[in-house]
Image (cartoon, rainbow, N blue to C red):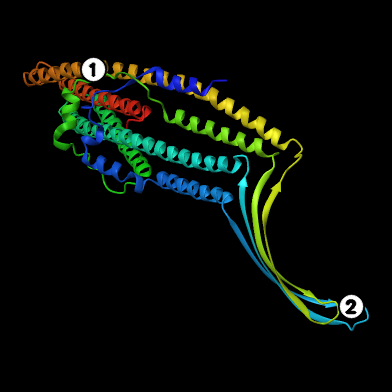
């Protein structure tokens, strides 16, 4: 079993990776509408609204738990109709009333009541951690979904432009066929290519519609999205930012949300162990009360009203519970050990995940540089093809191929940068710095 000191050392000693370039901008810094979406996400997201109520529920349950340590007062008033048959006296009916006020205050329960309160407090913390985790996850999902929408819009834009060129090509081939310069097969091939790209564009628009619905479902955002680039900063980020120079460096002492959650669950089991140990021990309560009753006199039909006050100590001691407390103690110890093993595994897994994310960032940074080089080559090829086409040294199809290559290079560059931003966002979320 891992000791508490060892667990703390595991958290604090080993080094992990963290992004130290504070100049790196988040996605919302380039798109004002995304910034507005994220600012309002706590009040709009359906899941976060549910999680918020869970936090409020746990706070209310702590109040219920704390009440077990407080003073409880009960008032009881009752009336009875009694028929009496006294020896050597006539039979008659009387009415008697009773009133009582009873108070009880726990004094000493071997720490069980305090432990129950501590458990309730930990559960509040766990619910707040879960809320923060969901907030972080939904915020991260929103950024990624927004970037996916941005890529789809760019694909639709390029696909629409390409479809227009395919349509012009089809019209041109049809006219040439009428002049006897093209065959019927070439016309059909051009038409088929045009229709295929028309279907592709329709599929992209459908994907955009589905992704937009998913984005609004996650965030609760009900307004239109414009994807306006604030002062062209995102375009500048794609074209000129040195991603390779912003690779995360080393730092120590960071733990994940799961580590924090497991630590609190371990503390809950420690308190459960205190409660289990107290089950078969004597417990003291302070009791007090006032009650009123009527006593019938033996030699008359009258009654005597009595006022009674009592105060004292009450001791309760469960001697044997058929091994219930012993079983609860064993189960609590087993859960505690399981959580400690899970904590060790989570620490190792978390470190490996951060290492993997950093390796992915380094790989994507290289991919971005390659995509920029490819874009430059594709752009040079396209400009050259325009000159060659104007000089009638290449065909329209060859020029169209260079245009397709340029559009593809643009998409690859955009996708590479967006993928880097997604992984970077996951990295920052993993170290609880988002």
Per the rendering, the mark at residue 377 is: none
At mark 2, the secondary structure is loop
Q: Which residue is nearer to you in this view: 431 or 202?
A: 431
In front: label 1 or label 2: 2
Callouts 1 and 2 close, C-beta under 8 Å: no
What is the quadrant of the N terminus in the image? top right
Q: Quadrant of residue 9?
A: top left
What is the quadrant of the C terminus in the image? top left
> Is the residue 36 above or below the residue 262 in the image?
below
Q: Which residue is nearer to you in this view: 204 or 109?
A: 109
Q: Which residue is nearer to you in this view: 269 or 274?
A: 274
- Circle 1 residues within 10 Å: few <14, some 14–19, many ≥20: some
x 34%, y 40%: residue:
215
Q: CA distance from mark 1 to mark 2?
A: 105 Å
393 on left or right of 357 = left
x 71%, y 47%: residue:
316
Locate residue 166, reporting x and y percent: 21, 30
Lower sequence index among marks 1 and 2: 2
Per the rendering, the mark at residue 244 is: 1
Q: Quadrant of residue 187?
A: top left
> Is the residue 212 above or below the residue 291 in the image?
above
Locate residue 136, reporting x and y percent: 37, 36
Q: Is residue 181 visible?
A: no
In the picture of the structure, the residue carrying the numbered disc 2 is 86
Q: Which residue is nearer to you in this view: 281 or 10?
A: 281
Number of disc labels: 2
76 on left or right of 143 = right
- Circle 2 residues within 10 Å: few <14, some 14–19, many ≥20: few
């Amino acid at each position: 079993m891992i000791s508490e000191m060892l667990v703390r050392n595991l958290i604090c000693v080993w080094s992990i990776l963290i992004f130290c370039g504070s100049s790196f901008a988040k996605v919302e810094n380039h798109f004002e509408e995304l910034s507005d979406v994220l600012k309002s996400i706590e009040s709009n997201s359906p899941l976060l609204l549910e999680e918020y109520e869970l936090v409020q529920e746990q706070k209310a349950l702590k109040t219920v738990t704390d009440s077990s340590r407080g003073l409880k007062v009960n008032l009881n008033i009752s009336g009875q109709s009694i028929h009496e048959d006294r020896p050597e006296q006539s039979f008659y009916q009387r009415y008697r009333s009773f009133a009582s006020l009873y108070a009880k205050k726990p004094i000493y329960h071997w720490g069980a009541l305090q432990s129950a309160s501590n458990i309730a407090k930990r559960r509040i913390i766990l619910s707040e951690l879960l809320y923060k985790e969901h907030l972080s996850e939904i915020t991260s999902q929103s950024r990624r979904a927004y970037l996916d929408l941005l890529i789809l819009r760019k694909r639709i834009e390029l696909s629409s432009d390409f479809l227009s060129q395919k349509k012009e090509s089809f019209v041109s081939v049809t006219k040439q066929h009428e002049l006897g310069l093209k065959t019927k097969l070439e016309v059909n091939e051009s038409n088929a290519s045009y229709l295929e790209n028309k279907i592709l564009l329709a599929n992209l628009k459908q994907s955009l519609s589905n992704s937009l619905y998913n984005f609004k479902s996650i965030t609760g955002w009900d307004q239109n999205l414009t994807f306006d680039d604030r002062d062209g900063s995102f375009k500048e980020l794609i074209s000129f930012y040195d991603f390779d120079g912003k690779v995360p460096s080393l730092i120590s002492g960071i733990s994940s949300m799961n580590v924090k959650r497991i630590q609190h669950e371990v503390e809950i089991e420690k308190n459960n162990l205190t409660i289990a140990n107290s089950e078969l021990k004597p417990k003291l309560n302070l009791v007090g009360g006032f009650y009123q009753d009527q006593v019938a006199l033996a030699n008359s039909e009258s009654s005597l009203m009595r006022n009674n006050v009592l105060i004292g100590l009450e001791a309760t001691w469960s001697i044997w519970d058929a091994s219930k407390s012993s079983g609860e103690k064993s189960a609590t110890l087993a859960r505690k050990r399981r959580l400690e093993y899970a904590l060790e595994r989570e620490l190792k897994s978390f470190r490996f995940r951060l290492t993997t994310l950093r390796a992915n960032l380094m790989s994507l940074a290289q991919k971005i540089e390659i995509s920029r080089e490819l874009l430059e080559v594709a752009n040079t090829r396209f400009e050259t093809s325009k000159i060659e086409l104007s000089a009638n040294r290449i065909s329209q199809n060859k020029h169209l191929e260079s245009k397709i290559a340029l559009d593809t290079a643009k998409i690859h560059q955009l996708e590479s940068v967006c993928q880097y931003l997604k992984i970077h966002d996951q990295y920052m979320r993993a170290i609880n710095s988002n």
